[in-house]
Image (spheres, rainbow, N blue to C red):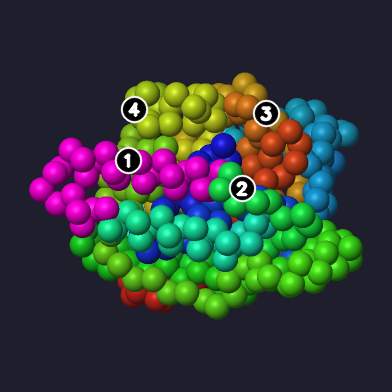
């Protein structure tokens, strides 16, 4: 269930299935695995919401989520003539986004720090996946000239991969956690080569000394691939698992008006391959995360905040620290199957700092967005 909802948002090629497979299975709250704050590179104009009574409300609503804890009950502002609400915060964010200058470049760059629980030994999963891949390759070689049988074989292969991801490898008998960084450069032009650099600054920690002792007793298996991996290819990348029609080039076609964007998102939800499994609220917030990490036009980003502001189930939790030590404002909303989406938004710039997924109060995934922006050279980070 969680494999799809907050899986790799921009899926990589089949050659990276082994790595991304266990990334999709990881769940987590691992702030202590990477405690050193990193500097966010983008500089924005002040978010006007922090002025006057809103600032007083947020200051009184401070919430810090400790490692291993579920999001806490929202703390209401102690003193404020007009208490800050999720709606007013999101509308102020919309105003800030609207004023941002439009920009462009050759590559869209994203740097993410993922904190997650390790569910199983990656080597066990990879060995089984490689066996599936070999069997599929051999079968396809024998089905040339039989397109219908080949299509059926590919469908069956996909089913087997999903089965392997969900219950094909035994869960670890001890609590272990990992943290790693991934950078991606996605080209604006079709056919150009993009790049993904994964497994950077990998760290593994354990829930307790006994968990580490149990790991050693099990032979100290490798719980995370620690060698950085660079992968270049020209495969077209979708921007959202739930919206396979969206890519870097057609994002500019999304509406800049609130009503028009709401209608467009409704239409995309109806056509989503996962609409039968995702409630409309879950779809909207998953898609919002995808779009907030993409190069939207200022008007579209503003309209997106306004659409979210109209959602009745959003809770303003107040100020919090993200996994990298940065301060932001937390907003959360329940979705289907007792899942909760939690966003941490920078109150100065209205940018998304971090997103989380929790199930029944337990954090499953935390992704801190260290940097994003335009670059004109493959492998070069955005300037400034």
Question: What's the CA distance linking mark 4 and mark 3?
Answer: 24 Å
Mark found first going from the N terminus, 4 or 1: 1
* Label 1: few (<14), some (14–19) or many (≥20) C-alpha neighbours in 10 Å: few
In the rendered image, which residue does mark 3 sit on? 338
Q: Nearer the viewer, residue 378 or 235?
A: 235
Say whether marks 4 and 1 touch (CB < 8 Å): no
Between the residue at mark 3 and the residue at mark 1, the CA separation in whole angstroms equals 30 Å
For the stretch drawn in magenta, what is the main secondary structure? helix
Residue tagged 1: 155
User: Which of the marked residues, 2 or 1, is nearer the chain's N terminus?
Assistant: 1
Q: CA distance from mark 2 to mark 1?
A: 32 Å
Judging depth in this view, the residue of 327 and 158 nearest the camera is: 158
Q: Residues within 10 Å of mark 3 (few under 14, many from 20)?
A: few
The answer to whether marks 3 and 2 mark residues whose Cβ atoms lie closer than 8 Å is: no
| Quarter of image, res 252 | top left
| Secondary structure at numbered mark 1 | helix
Residue holding disc 4: 271
Please state the extent of the stretch shown in magenta in the rendering.
139-166
């Amino acid at each position: 269930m969680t494999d799809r909802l907050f899986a790799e948002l921009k899926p990589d090629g089949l050659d990276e299935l082994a790595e991304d497979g266990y990334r999709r299975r990881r769940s987590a709250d691992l702030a202590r695995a990477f405690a050193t704050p990193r500097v966010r590179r983008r500089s924005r104009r002040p978010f006007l919401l922090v002025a006057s009574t809103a600032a007083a409300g947020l200051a009184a609503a401070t919430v810090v989520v400790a490692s291993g804890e579920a999001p806490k009950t929202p703390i209401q502002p102690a003193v404020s003539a007009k208490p800050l609400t999720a709606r007013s915060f999101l509308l102020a964010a919309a105003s800030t986004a609207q004023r941002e200058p439009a920009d462009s470049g050759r590559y869209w760059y994203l740097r993410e720090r993922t904190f997650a629980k390790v569910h199983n030994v990656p080597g066990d999963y990879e060995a089984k996946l490689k066996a599936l891949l070999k069997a599929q390759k051999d079968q396809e070689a024998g089905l040339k000239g039989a397109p219908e049988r080949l299509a059926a074989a590919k469908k069956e292969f996909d089913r087997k991969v999903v089965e392997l991801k969900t219950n094909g490898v035994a869960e670890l008998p001890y609590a272990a956690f990992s943290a790693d960084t991934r950078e991606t450069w996605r080209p604006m032009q079709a056919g150009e080569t993009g790049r993904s650099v994964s497994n950077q600054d990998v760290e593994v920690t354990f829930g307790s000394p006994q968990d580490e002792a149990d790991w050693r007793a099990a032979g100290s298996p490798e719980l995370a691939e620690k060698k950085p991996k660079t992968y270049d290819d020209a495969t077209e990348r979708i921007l959202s698992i739930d919206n396979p029609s969206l890519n870097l080039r057609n994002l500019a076609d999304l509406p800049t008006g609130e009503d028009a964007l709401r209608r467009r998102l409704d239409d995309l939800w109806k056509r989503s391959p996962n609409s039968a499994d995702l409630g409309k609220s879950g779809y909207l917030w998953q898609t919002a995360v995808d779009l907030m990490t993409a190069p939207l036009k200022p008007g579209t980003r503003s309209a997106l905040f306004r659409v979210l502001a109209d959602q009745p189930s959003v809770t303003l939790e107040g100020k919090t620290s993200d996994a990298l030590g940065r301060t932001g404002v937390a907003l959360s909303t329940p979705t289907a199957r007792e899942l909760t989406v939690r966003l941490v938004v920078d109150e100065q710039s209205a940018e998304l700092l971090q997103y989380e997924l929790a199930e029944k109060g337990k954090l499953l995934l935390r992704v801190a967005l260290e940097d994003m922006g335009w670059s004109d050279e493959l492998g070069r980070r955005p300037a400034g």
